[in-house]
Amino acid sequence: MSRPLPGAPREPSCVLGRMIPTSIAPDAVKAAGWRDHGLLVVALNDPRLGWADRELIRTIGEKLYGTREGRR
């Protein structure tokens, strides 16, 4: 076990301290969902998508869930 640096925060001493959540990268969660469960989470404004990709995703979303509020 390494010694903490002087002035560094200490590990929590109670059990509840271990329940403090750590931040998770959203893209890592999306990738794991796709790999592990076949779930795809896509933002229509993702800059990695071209126009045709966005239109395909929008069409699928509207088919499954209906038109988005404030659209059309």
Image: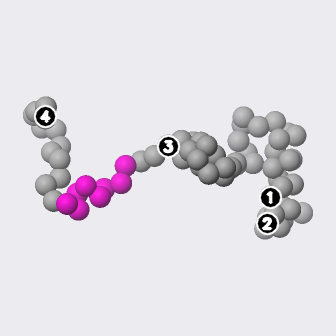
**Residue type pointed to by label 4:** Met
Q: What residue is disc 4 on?
A: 1
C-alpha separation, residue under disc 4 versus residue under disc 1: 51 Å
**Residue type pointed to by label 2:** Tyr
Residue 30 shows in the view: no
Give the mark toward the camera: 4 or 3.
4
Q: What residue is disc 2 on?
A: 65
Which residues make up the magenta segment? Answer: 15-22
Q: Secondary structure at mark 4?
A: loop
Q: Image check: 6 left or right of 55? A: left
Q: Is residue 18 magenta?
A: yes
Q: Residue at x 15, y 45 (%)?
A: 10
C-alpha separation, residue under disc 1 versus residue under disc 2: 6 Å
C-alpha separation, residue under disc 4 versus residue under disc 2: 52 Å
User: Contact (CB < 8 A) between labels 3 and 2?
Assistant: no
Q: Position of residue 68 (x, y in %)?
A: 79, 64
